[in-house]
Amino acid sequence: MKILLNVITLVIVMSTVAYSQVGCGTIQTAEFAEELRKNKANWNKTINRGQMPRFVPITIHRVGDGGGDGKINEEKCYQAICLLNERYALAGVNMFFYLKQFNEINSETLHTNPRRAGGIINSAKDRSSLNVFCVGDIINPNNPNAPGTTLGYYAPGVQNDFVVMQNSSMGDSGYTLEHELGHFFTLRHTHYGWEDNSVTPNGSGYDASGNALGVCPDSYPENEKIMITSIGSSQTPGMTTVELVDGSNCETAGDEICDTPADYGTGFCCGCCTMRWTILDRNCDTLAPMLNNIMGYAGSCSTWEFSPDQVVAMETSFDADNRAYLRNDDVVNYEPITADVALVFPIGFEKVEVYDNIELQWEPVPGAEIYYVTVEDEIFQTTENSLTVTWLGPNDPLVTWKVDAFSKFGGGCFSGAGDVFSTGDQETSAVNDISFVDDVAIYPNPISKNQNINVSFDSSKAFKADVRIMDITGKTVYTAQNVSFSSGQAQYAIPTNGMNNGIYILELATEEGAITEKLIID
């Protein structure tokens, strides 16, 4: 089937209620377009620099509702950054993104309706990194009763310059983060102006009767031709010139990047990555859009790309004066996590005789800065290559666990290594290896937050011990060294100020042995 857009004089603007057809809510303002044009004048400088690596710091704002619920988990953020680096590298972009920091925000408005939370966003922004706000939902102003339809957007302008992402779209197969960061670095949609007006068979506006034309005859009645010379949409305020296939107006039409072919949004209408129809522009030339472009709206592509000129545009944007705040010297090498995590113990359905004090172990991963350990449905963080769990029950036949390794550049692009073990019926959390100490007791247990933990015991001689409390990840939350205890009955009080609810291990360590006891704060 052929679809003809043939013209003479009439300018058409077709509008629909759709605000963001595939989840992008970026409004490509005149200011946005001017930044691209200004940067194009400096493309040669960027090209002359060659393949210089550019490191981009990211602050991820984990936004919860008013009570702090609904925040994206940190592991998913690391995975999204890993995928972002991997996908941009495959697309030829010499930029490397790294996590500068997480920021925590609780705000009902920002969590669901970020466009109405500009004051909160601007007060929370980090002024020396690219700010990404991860929220529960982004209310569509044209369709507030359709949650989840806007997956992300970039807010352009000096007073804005941030990205908002719906939690579910971080690291998704639709390349939402990659797309929105393309906008951040001045790229328009390849189908700029056609967001609400994609060309489909039998669509409106192609001839006087509203039908697609099947041929391109010079003799077609002039009074039945409609020439579409300009187009506009809810995401492109004003009008833009329709780009021609021959490239004669590519500098000023469409996305204004000449090596991205003319695109009238056809990929979105078919949800495909190959053209299903022959579509002719107003010169009767056949459209051949780059449907797998990251800045397009197509779907089902096996690979996604930027064009070479788009890459130059992005790198020039990073080099521009208004992006000086992104440039610093704190990262000099890109060191991605490339090795899988090799689990050591317990593995292969191994049975562990104890259940309340099991040390999970794995091989250290080169370049890893933090590990996320998932045991059953619980997630723990550690910088070590081991983790002691104390909360499992006896005789559990099927305990699952896996480990993901991360650095500031992400990691864990895909699920980490996983394995299974079972627990026995022996309890080991209460241990007394000190021969001269008897009748050890801690009370109250469980204990409420901010109360003192009391330790009592009988000792046949005076001694010194290091007192330590560790959480279930092995992190020390309290320590006191060389505490003196006299012979006879001894007592020692430990404050729990600042300790969260959970399970802890209390340890008294001497040169002759140690005492360990499980403690619960509720």
Image (cartoon, grey):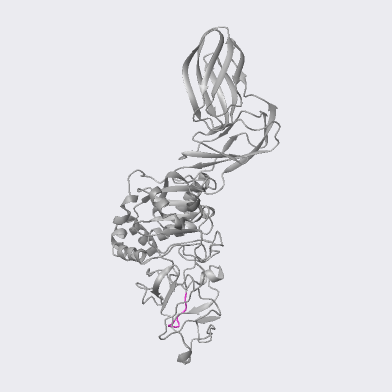
Q: Position of residue 202 (x, y in %)?
A: 56, 80
Q: In this rendered view, identify the residue nearer to me: 345 or 72.
A: 72
Q: Which residue is pictured at 38% across the width and 47% down the height? A: 126
Picture quadrant where residue 156 is located = bottom left
Specify whether residue 486 is painted magenta.
no
Residue 275 relative to residue 261: left or right: right
Residue 157 sits above or below residue 124 on the image = below
Q: Position of residue 158 (x, y in %)?
A: 34, 57
Picture quadrant where residue 441 is located = top right
Q: In this rendered view, identify the residue nearer to me: 157 or 216.
A: 157
Is the N terminus in the top left, top right, bottom left or bottom right quadrant?
bottom right
Q: Main secondary structure of the magenta part?
A: loop
The stretch in magenta equals 282-287
Residue 119 sits above or below residue 368 on the image = below
Residue 98 relative to residue 501: left or right: left
Specify whether residue 285 is painted magenta.
yes
Q: Where is residue 447 in the image (x, y as percent from the top left)?
A: 58, 26
Q: Where is residue 268 in the image (x, y as percent from the top left)?
A: 52, 69
Is the C terminus in the top left, top right, bottom left or bottom right quadrant?
top right
Q: In this rendered view, identify the residue nearer to me: 481 or 257.
A: 481
Can residue 170 be spotted in the picture?
A: no
